[in-house]
Each structure stands twice: as structure tokens, then as C-alpha cells.
Image: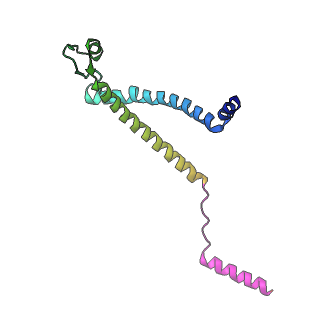
Amino acid sequence: MLNEFKEFIARGNVIDLAVGVIIGAAFSKIVDSVVNDLVMPIVGAITGGGFDFSDYFVALSANVTAPTLAAAREQGAVFAYGSFITVLINFVILAWIIFLMIKVVNRARASMEKEKAPEPATPPPQDILLLSEIRDLLKQRA
């Protein structure tokens, strides 16, 4: 069983997956920073306060009277829909940013592939082809 585990770990795709997870975690921090530090302040300035719905909730018991979600949870059961709305909005912004980043990367790849690809040879003009045929015929007769 230990040998099977060693063989499993030594496979390239497992190591590639581990590297992908590590890179993904680091990339996640970068994207979170872009959203929280660059995009959300601009959105907040435009909308006059941002999209923080985290304290929006509906009390499920009569004795909940607190104005904040944390205090309301201490008093009883609450339906905390505001956190979900905030996470959903952040996800949509995050997905849009990732879409734009991938679009830029794909354009860069396409332009690099165009530079690498050799241009197809254009066929010679008709008069050059005729002259080449005449030359070949003269060589055959001589």
C-alpha cells in the first residue's frame, strides 16, 4: 500500500495539481485585493457607500431587537440574508475581473502565436511560372 501511495504521489498530474492549488491560493489573494482595495472603493465612491449588506437580517424570534447581525445572533435566531447578498455581489465582481484578465491573457497568447507562425509563401506570379516552364523545357531539349 505504501508503494502504491508513493507511485500515486510521484505521478506528474498529482504534483501539477498541488502546484495549481498553491498558485490558485496565491492568485486568490491577488484577486481579493483587486476587488477589495481597488474596485470596491471606486464602486463605493460612485454609489455613495458601497455594497455592504452584512447587517441586513430578518429576526426569526420575537425577542431579537438588536440593530447589528452579531448582536442579533446573540439574542436569537436570525435569517441573515445580507451576508449572502454581499458575497454574491463580490463574486460577480470577482468573476468579471477574472474574465477580463483571462481575456487579456488570451489576446497576448494569440498575438504571440501570430508572431511565431511563419507567413505562408505566396505563389509566384503567372509570368514567372511561365518563364520557369520555358526554362525547364529548354533544359530538356539541350
Number of labels in the image equals 0
Q: Is residue 48 left or right of residue 129?
A: left
Q: Is residue 6 left or right of residue 96?
A: right
Indicate the colouring scheme: rainbow
Please, is residue 26 above or below residue 95 in the view? above
Quarter of the figure that contains the N terminus: top right
The reply to whether residue 52 is visible in this rendering is no
The reply to whether residue 136 is visible in this rendering is yes
Please, is residue 36 above or below residue 124 in the view? above
Q: Is residue 95 left or right of residue 117?
A: left
Q: Residue at x 47, y 27 (%)?
A: 29
Q: Residue at x 56, y 34 (%)?
A: 20
Q: Residue furthest toward the left?
A: 62
Quarter of the figure that contains the C terminus: bottom right
Q: Magenta residues, as a range?
A: 117-141
Residue 68 % position (x, y) = 26, 16
Classified by dominant secondary structure, the portion drawn in magenta counts as helix
Residue 132 % position (x, y) = 69, 78
Q: Residue at x 30, y 22 (%)?
A: 54
Is residue 140 part of the magenta span, yes or no?
Answer: yes
Residue 98 % position (x, y) = 44, 38
Quarter of the image for residue 34 reads top left
Q: Is residue 104 left or right of residue 42?
A: right
Is residue 73 part of the magenta span, yes or no?
Answer: no
Q: Residue furthest toward the front?
A: 1
Q: Nearer the viewer, residue 87 or 126?
A: 87
Please, is residue 125 above or below residue 49 in the view? below
Residue 130 % position (x, y) = 65, 81
Q: Residue at x 46, y 39 (%)?
A: 101
Q: Nearer the viewer, residue 116 or 15?
A: 15
Q: Residue furthest toward the bottom?
A: 141
